[in-house]
Amino acid sequence: MDRDRSRLNRLNRLSRLSLRPAPLLWGTAVAVPLGFLAVFFAWPVAALVVRGFVPDGVLDLTGFAEVLSSPRTWRLVWLTLTQAVLGTAFSVLLGLPLAYLLYRRSFPGRVLVRGLVTVPFVLPAVVVGVAFRTLFAPGGALGFLGLEESLAGIVVALVFFNVSVVVRTVGGLWERLDPRTEQAAASLGAGPARVFRTVTLPSLAPAIASAASVVFLFCATAFGVVLVLGGVRYGTIETEIWTRTTQFLDLRSASVLSILQLVVISGALAVSARARRRREAALRLVSAHGSARRLSWRSPKDLTMALVGAAIVGGLMVLPLAGLVTRSFREPDGSWGPGNYVALGTTGERNALVVTVWEATATSLRTALAATVISLVVGGLVALVVSRRPRSVGARRAVGALDGLFMLPLGVSAVTVGFGFLITMDQPVLGVDLRTSGLLVPVAQAVVAVPLVVRTVLPVLRAIDPRLREVAAVLGSGPGRVLRTVDLPIALRSVGLATGFAFAVSLGEFGATSFLARPDGATLPVVIYRLIGRPGAENYGMALAASVVLAALTATVMMVAERLRDERAGGEF
Amino acid sequence: MLRLSGAHAGTIQAGPAAGALSVALLLAGCGGSGSGGSGSDGSGAGAGDPAASGTVTLVTHDSWALDEKVVERFEEESGLTVEVSAAGDAGTLVNQLVLTKDAPLGDAVFGIDNTFASRALEAGVVEEYTPADLPDGVEQLGGALTPIDQGDVCVNADEAWFEKSDLEVPKTLEDLADPQYRDLLVVSNPATSSPGLAFLLATVGAFGEDGFEDYWTSLVDNGVKVADSWEDAYYVDFSGADEGGERPLVLSYATSPAFTVSEDGSESTTSALLETCFRQVEYAGVLAGSDNPEGAQAFVDFLLGEDAQAALPESMYMYPADPATELPADWEKFAPQAEAPFEVAPAEVSEHRDEWIERWTETVVG
């Protein structure tokens, strides 16, 4: 009887040649992330926006007319889009050669450079802002470029922050593209440029689109960099929401601006999702080990790439970072030495802090670990669901919507989420006031890290040839087994990278953390911000030393993630 | 305008206070039998609140850094446990309190300053409480906000730069607009930084509500630079911070020169222009709807008490509100207070702050 049924099932699968949905499994996979997003993102944001429109129990929509008719608003929208588009375009443009160099060519110190490239991504904006302003100021090393208080200056800093997203995401796919397709094209007579345009680029398109949409969101909602480098003349929707909410308590305008931000960002995401969907296809993937060729100094192409890469890394990253590291060794009295690092065991000049910087470092690591676990679970489930292409149009649309939904936290102001928490979490849970307990910190960081996990894992999952799953199903594997034997081993390879990203993003998160962390539970970026905000050469020196520590931690984490991935990738397929 | 309407404060106080009192009594009972000797005799607690016990949650801004030992002494003497929750800068703090009025974030608040005080009072986030022994010269706001400390926001000068350039250090606001000091001053944005706002208020205090824009126009003509934040102005643009900045005049605090004292401790390389100052006063109070109003009251008493007042200069770098408090020896020399800082009434600030910032933005940014 049982055997009959199983045979029937198998026949059934054969005839439909698709995965039979397992309602419980997929139901959970959808419900857990949705619940998470609803409670920790959608609800707080909606609550705050509603508060803006219903100030005294009466619906008041006059804010729309007022804000939308102001020329200032449209200037902000224009600036937001301009800097985000430019920031994204240059990040992709400069990221591609780096991705090639770091993932398709091997050379001594490659792992180190890969780690280094990620460092800017997590540095606190306030430190980066000051570092760049020091370079751009009239007396600074790059003062002659006239970048101070200019759009170009903001874009340079945005690229500095975000180029690693492109390098990592695109590089991760590039190193596992089967080189034989390119070789075949070449042997059929296509020149290198043509091979790149017709074979490589289309294969990389999903990863490029994926990275670009993340970078776009980061650029569009950049806050600290725009304020510090733009001076008073430049502002974006994000900076306006921030000042309207934290300084003026003008929730009426802030709510309108939040909705405007959401519309602008959803629009941009929809465009990119369409581009992405059109490009995504099953790819022939190989082990990362086989694809990278040693960099040859005799090949002119390699030499050019190496020089281009060195120029980008040197000019964009090493210059500001070296300035930061060098300065961190200058002691308050002007001499050189490790004094600022020794001081990290203290609470700063005249007790600027409540905890020592090392204690804050421990807190940061603990919090980031928790946030990483949460974001891997939630993000992993989302990626899994979104990677499927159901046959019904409705289900396909739903999957697409889910994909977009989980990108939104990157596009909404941290201040809106932070203030939203204050009004939605106003009931104690088990006698603990979540708002002041510090328990929400890893959760808030995870909300920001989830989209990165999704964007990192998804291209790899989508690149799995559906026929692999079909074959497994035909051979009698249930849905759980298909996941375990087909999806999981392949996904695990990108999980190393996703872990690194999630960890890095949690380490560097400042916006939401600063609202939710208690003084005795301050994280590294929070203490850096406090140190630099107080007078005293000692505090300033400590802030720089602490930034270097944060940078070193990040680089290490990314290098470890890198190693994990390589080991797992060895062997099969 | 300033007065908190009595009825309003009264209604808030009645309900939760009664409940909290019984909780407090219950807890006091437990403490007496259990953890014997933890100062439950109440002698050390602030006068007039012998029933205080349990946990008191302090909501404050991110510059809170009162010496932990002082807080521990208070905990030992009062039998209370202090938990601290910090929420961004002073403006953010007040706005968060207004938003969470119906479910307060804690019991006591410290760090509402005179530029945001009226907003807090009008929204009714603090309830009326006057410490029993208010020292002479300490004046409350609205019967609910008790001043704890104060500090002056003033233009600072890089003495060495002026000496080298053979130029006299400017003294007054008018001097800053004098062409001989062209391109020398950097200030911070009042929309995004609290010293920036304080300086805008200094100019409103000095030139009046109708005159401050003209003054700023003259500053703009004289090449004033506006940075986004204090740290940005001080560390990037100010020459006196030794970070390669090029401007010898910066908006900072009257106490900043104490941070640039020379090796031998004899003099400071920077000075504050005491005729350009606005005084920031920081207040503490009991949050309306607190679970532990007695504890919060005891905490406010403690902040105004001798121990905390004496610790303020060294740990928070502010002047204690109680004029009788003895100051550290080097303060007279390096961190003197302005004799006649510019003033704007808190109610005026509350009413016009946004409008003044907008007018400033139009004048300076265009």
Image (spheres, coloured by chain):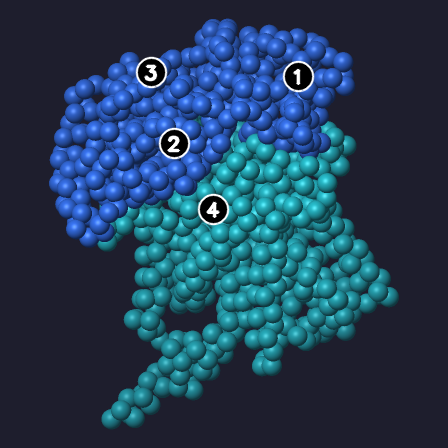
From the top left corner, tell me how far across and down residue A8 is, in percent: 31, 87
What's the mark number on residue B136? 3
For mark 4, what is the residue? A355
For numbered disc 4, what is the local secondary structure? loop
Colour that chain A carries in the picture? cyan
Q: Are marks 3 and 4 in contact (CB under 8 Å)?
A: no
The quadrant the C terminus of chain A occupies is bottom right
Q: How far apart are the two marked residues, 3 and 4, measured between alpha carbons?
A: 35 Å
From the top left corner, tell me how far across and down residue A161 is, in percent: 61, 47
Q: How far apart are the two marked residues, 2 and 3, measured between alpha carbons?
A: 17 Å
For mark 2, what is the residue? B308
From the top left corner, tell me how far across and down residue B212 is, in percent: 51, 9
Check the image and report above or below for A282 versus A143: below
Q: Counting residues from the N terminus, which is met first, the one under dot 3 or under dot 1?
A: 3
Q: How far apart are the two marked residues, 4 and 2, measured between alpha carbons?
A: 19 Å
For mark 1, what is the residue? B223
